[in-house]
Amino acid sequence: MAEKWYVNLVQTDKLENAGMEYKISIAAKNWGFKNLQSTSKDSMEVEWKLDVKADSVKSTELTIPQKPLAHDSTVADKNNDFLNVLKLPHSGGDLFTVKAKTKSANDYTDIAELETWRRIYYSFFT
């Protein structure tokens, strides 16, 4: 099930699933890189892919930014994590699946799935 992500709200301590960017982190040890010191930097690269699904609109009408993922591939940082950032559109209703794979792998693995929402507030006056 996709995580709800509110694109029109600011991220706070009480509301963590909000904002225009979704930060993604994968621990290198979870990808089979056990002895990171003896592994060459080239083989420690992760390739990223984004699948976008929007049932309510045609794919040509999606409002995603020109380059929604900050990086097409990344290497492990000093904490041995692979990091990326997904830039989200202003509109809600899109379903994003972030996938990643190591250079040696054949298939991508689903890392995160989120659906963009907009929270609307209104008041009645009588």
Image: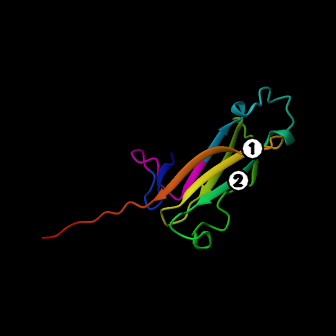
The three-letter amino acid code for the residue at tag 1 is: Lys
Q: Residue 37, percent across and down?
A: 82, 29
Main SS of the magenta part reads: loop
Q: Residue furthest top?
A: 35
Give SS at disc 2.
strand
Numbered badge on residue 120: none
Q: Residue at x 45, y 47 (%)?
A: 16
Q: Is residue 21 magenta?
A: yes
Q: Residue furthest bottom?
A: 61
Q: Residue at x 82, y 44 (%)?
A: 103
Vertical arrangement, residue 117 with respect to residue 80, above or below:
below
Q: In the image, is 104 to the left or to the right of 81?
A: right
The quadrant of the rendering that contains the C terminus is: bottom left
Q: Is residue 67 magenta?
A: no
Query: Local crowd at mark 2 within 10 Å, few (<14), some, or many (≥20)?
Result: some
Q: Say whether disc 1 or disc 2 marks the residue closer to the N-terminus.
A: 2
Q: Residue 31, percent across and down?
A: 73, 34
Q: Which residue is mark 2?
A: 49
Magenta stretch? 12-23
Q: Are marks 1 and 2 in contact (CB under 8 Å)?
A: yes
Q: Which residue is mark 1?
A: 101
